[in-house]
Image: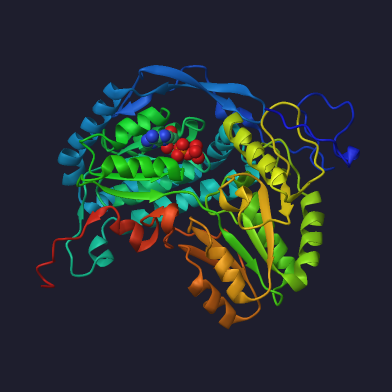
Amino acid sequence: MTTKRKSTKPHRRTANAPENSFVAGGFAPAPEDASILRLDTKPRRLLIGGKWVAGASTRETINPATGEPIATFAIAGPKQVDAAVAAARRAYEGEWSALPAAERGKLLFRLARLLQERSREFAVLESLDGGKPIRESRDIDIPLAAAHIFHHAGWADKLDYAAPGRRPRPLGVAAQIIPWNFPLLMAAWKLAPALATGNTVVLKPAETTPLTALLLGQLIEEAGFPPGVVNILTGAGQTGATLAAHPGVDKIAFTGSTAVGKAIQRALAGSQKRYTLELGGKAAHILFEDCAIDQAVEGIINGIFFNQGHVCCAGSRLFVQEGIADTVIRKLKRRIETLVVGDPLDKNTDIGAINSPEQLERIQELVAAGKAEGAECWQGPQTLPRRGCWFAPTLFTGCSQSHRIVREEIFGPVLAIQTFRTPAEAIEKANNTPFGLSGGVWTDKGAKIFKVTGALRAGVIWANTFNKFDPSSPFGGYKESGIGREGGLHGLHAYLDLHHQSPTMS
Ligand code: ADP
């Protein structure tokens, strides 16, 4: 599972460095202290009806930077799924619905504050379990998760204003299935709107990254949420499938691969269940000749190498206008050479570990396909650690629209570059994809921003920036990127029944 590459810059790693001691791009190592975690060896349990209970079996979660196990966690079987859905229903029909909305808000505010207080612990655990750089989990994942909970806490007692003229009601029990790329942030994106709107939840984290959701479960208890309002079932795809198909669930919120999203949609056909699906992406990042090139290069780097490219809205297809293509590619390569790839817990690290051996294999397979189909591959000179899952930052030039690396989501640090001459050509190529989640446009001209962003078929489009997230801004896709939005008013509506008119407004 190790990708070994010949270094063109031998000084980046001392010749006799012990295995897996990383030398961060010439900087002295600056590791975050992992002892804050107080990790114990007891198997992690499932949170059902306010009690921590055993599952049907257990599984280990692995640190992808070293390949070593971190903890054992429970796999929920059909019995536990039943119990969790029943507990969520009891809580919904009992204590939770009886609680004044302002009290729901207070619980969410308390949860957000507890998360902020323990943010360092969460950041270390997120990086250890998932492989992402501590700089990102510390500065992005955890603060954004808290921001999302704060934002929705404020909505809890103001829902009439979220849907004027209606009398919004919760849907009931929400099943929420989340992926491994932003484990805590996705848990927050799912839990906060569901709880603010008065639903109860059964949450299923991904099998390679269950730990921060379980720690969040402890904070949910500490905050004082009534038992059964949030139930957490760890497990793999089978647990997710059982939960999504459970007859006791009123709403399914899923974030993950397009293939699983389609399977869930098929399973739900003909049922009354509401659902939102946030699936894959293949974002076009478009650079016009009149853009600020250096800023755009930073945007491209952030767009594709943030979180090792494990980002559904990653800017994975770059379209550069012909006149600046050579300059942009030269600057990109120079910038990539400065990226620090290594220990996720080192504060210097820009690119951490690939989340799992399975994901590494998928990236390797698609990169091999890119080469075989005739695109030209260039990789950063970083020497990769010997143990664990790693992939060097990679660019492909000479790509055509038919190449797999242009059509398929790679979900890794791999950028496919193409050129264009006119805005119309850029738009046509950008839209020539089954996905439609995000996009980026770089130009000095405001009118061009409006023209191009209006023509791109994607749910979120950034102009002269990339990867900006805010709880008040809806996020979601078109076509095979999914259905529904998370965040903002759209995200609230996805957890509300809006069919009842307010008597004062009728
Ligand atoms: P990826 O391919 O990126 O790992 P998946 O879609 O497989 O994404 O996983 C996202 C989430 O969906 C995880 O929590 C996973 O356990 C869950 N999952 C996988 N298969 C299914 C399924 N058939 N039904 C419901 N959930 C599933």
In the figure, 229 relative to 377: above or below?
above
Which residue is at a point 43% across and 28% down the rendered structure image? 236
Residue 350 in view, yes or no: no
Query: Can you say which quadrant of the picture contains the N terminus?
Result: top right
Q: Which image quarter has ligand 1? A: top left
Foreground pick, 377 / 42:
377
Does residue 179 appear left or right of residue 265 in this picture?
Answer: right
Count of labels shown?
0
Q: Position of residue 451 (x, y in %)?
A: 53, 78
Q: Is residue 380 left or right of residue 64?
A: right
Question: In terms of image quadrants, where is residue 28?
Answer: top right
Quarter of the picture containing the C terminus is bottom left
- Can you say whether 192 is above or below 418 in the image? above
User: Taking 80 as reference, is 342 above or below it?
Assistant: below
Q: Answer with left or right where residue 264 lies relative to residue 369.
A: left
Question: Residue 270, image x and y in percent?
Answer: 21, 46
Residue shown at the point (42%, 62%) measured from the top left: 472
From the top left corner, tell me how far across and down residue 172 is, in percent. 21, 45
The answer to whether residue 236 is visible is yes
Which residue sits at x=59%, y=45%? 410
Instruction: In this rendered view, identify the residue nearer to me: 317 or 54.
Output: 317
Q: Quadrant of residue 14?
A: top right
Which color scheme did the rendering employ for the protein? rainbow
